[in-house]
Image (cartoon, rainbow, N blue to C red):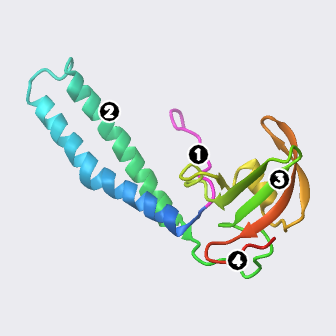
Amino acid sequence: MAGTRPATRSGSKYVTPEGARRLRAELDELWRVERPAVTQAVADAAAQGDRSENAEYIYGKRRLREIDRRVRFLRGRLDGMVIVSQPPADQTRIFFGAWVTVVDQAGAVRRHRIVGSDEFDQGTGYISMDSPLGRALLGKRVGDEFEIELPAGAASVKIEAIEYEGTVPIR
């Protein structure tokens, strides 16, 4: 069919409880606060007369479309998400929600949390389980070393520690 966009991959369906709360808060803010304010601004601009050259009206209508698009996306994502609130039975391996301490070949120590695609930019050190590093880390154990191809080039990484929220780190 002409004019239709190809389906886009929406990422993993998993989310932490904190991530789900943030997404719900964003949805609530958009629907209950921002959308009514923009709707009122559009109505006020429309009351001024000629809409074809009314910048406030044109911008307001565009912003309403953006808000509605984001609201539809958030509702769809939240409906299909699985909230992971418990650590896995095998806490010696890296799974969703784990905090992982890694050391690269240069000796740089980094700490990452494996999260869903909707929350990776929500906090310092959060990486998506769908990212190259996130996929490479899943299932690994403390002491495992591996090579990974990153945008900056190949890197050798060693896992130093694994920790899940509310548990003792495994080193």
10 Å neighbourhood of mark 3: few (<14), some, or many (≥20)?
some
Query: Residue flagged by tag 2: what amino acid is it?
Result: Arg
Q: Nearer the viewer, mark 2 or mark 1?
A: 2
User: Mark 4 to mark 3: distance in Å?
Assistant: 20 Å
| Residue 54, horizontal then vertical, whole percent | 19, 21
User: Mark 2 to mark 1: distance in Å?
Assistant: 23 Å
Residue closer to the observer: 87 or 62 = 87
Query: Residue flagged by tag 4: what amino acid is it?
Result: Val
Query: Residue flagged by tag 1: what amino acid is it?
Result: Ala
Q: Earlier in the sequence, mark 2 or mark 4?
A: 2
Question: What secondary structure is the stretch in magenta mostly built from?
Answer: loop
In the image, what residue occupies the spot 79% across and 56% down?
A: 102
User: Mark 3 to mark 1: distance in Å?
Assistant: 37 Å
Residue closer to the observer: 70 or 149 = 149
Residue 148 placement, left or right of 114: right
Q: Are marks 2 and 4 in contact (CB under 8 Å)?
A: no
10 Å neighbourhood of mark 2: few (<14), some, or many (≥20)?
few
Q: Is residue 76 magenta?
A: no
In the image, what residue occupies the spot 91% across and 57% down?
A: 145
For disc 3, the marked residue is: 103
Q: Nearer the viewer, mark 1 or mark 4?
A: 4
10 Å neighbourhood of mark 4: few (<14), some, or many (≥20)?
few
* Quarter of the picture holding the N terminus: top right
Is the residue 127 above or below the residue 155 in the image? below
| Residue 155, horizontal then vertical, whole percent | 87, 43
Is the residue 152 above or below the residue 137 in the image? above
For disc 1, the marked residue is: 7
